[in-house]
Image: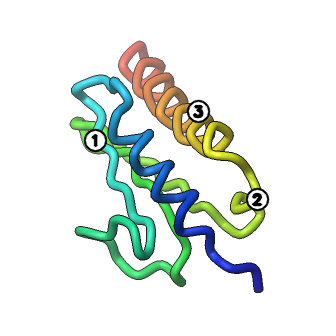
Amino acid sequence: MMEYPVEKFKKLAEELRSMALSPEIDLVVCFPGVEDEECEEDEGKPYVIIRHVEGPEKKLVFSENYWKADVETLKGAVLFQIKALMEELQSFEGE
């Protein structure tokens, strides 16, 4: 089993905290050993919950195949999920 890269996820947590996000979006960062307030235990894998004020949310679990990626790539994965959630809501509202 690969060792969980705590330093990388520390850096990612800082990056995510400093991002300018829509006020409708709340990020719950659950990285073991870094940030784990209000997190349920999830096999010790780091994850982010992207929560919208209207209720819908996405959970992005960083499994081991993510651990080799650089911080920018990981941040990109989170941004992609945020964008996907926003698009889903817009198409839902448009129906």
Report crowding for label 1: few under 14, some 14 to 19, many 20 or more residues within 10 A (C-alpha): some
The amino acid type of the residue labelled 1 equals Asp
Q: Secondary structure at mark 1?
A: strand
Q: Quadrant of the N terminus?
A: bottom right
Is 79 rendered above or below residue 92?
below
How are the colours assigned in the image? Answer: rainbow
Residue of label 3? 80
Mark 1 → mark 3, Cα distance in angstroms: 15 Å
Name the secondary structure under disc 3: helix
Instruction: Answer with mark 2 or mark 1, whichever residue precedes in sequence.
Output: 1
Q: Residues within 10 Å of mark 3 (few under 14, many from 20)?
A: few
- Amino acid type for the residue under numbered disc 3: Phe
Q: Residues within 10 Å of mark 2 (few under 14, many from 20)?
A: few
Q: Earlier in the sequence, mark 3 or mark 2?
A: 2
Q: At 61% across and 45% down in the image, what residue appears?
A: 71
Quarter the C terminus occupies: top left
Question: Which of these two is toward me, 75 or 26?
Answer: 75
Which residue is denoted by mark 1 in the rendering? 26
Q: Is residue 9 left or right of residue 30?
A: right
Image vertical order of residue 28 relative to residue 80, above or below = below
- Residue 78: give x, y in percent of width and height: 53, 41
If you read the primary sequence from the N terminus, does the residue marked by circle 1 or circle 3 appear first?
1
Comparing labels 3 and 2, the label whose residue is closer to the camera: 2
**Left or right, residue 2 beside residue 56:** right
The residues tagged by marks 2 and 1 sit, at their Cα atoms, a distance apart of: 26 Å
Looking at the image, which is closer to me, 32 or 24?
32
Residues marked 1 and 3 touching at CB (< 8 Å): no
**Residue 68 bears which disc, if any?**
2
Residue 11 image point, x, y percent: 49, 50
Residue lying at 70% horizontally and 62% vertically, measured from the top left: 67
Q: Which quadrant of the structure image shows residue 74? A: top right
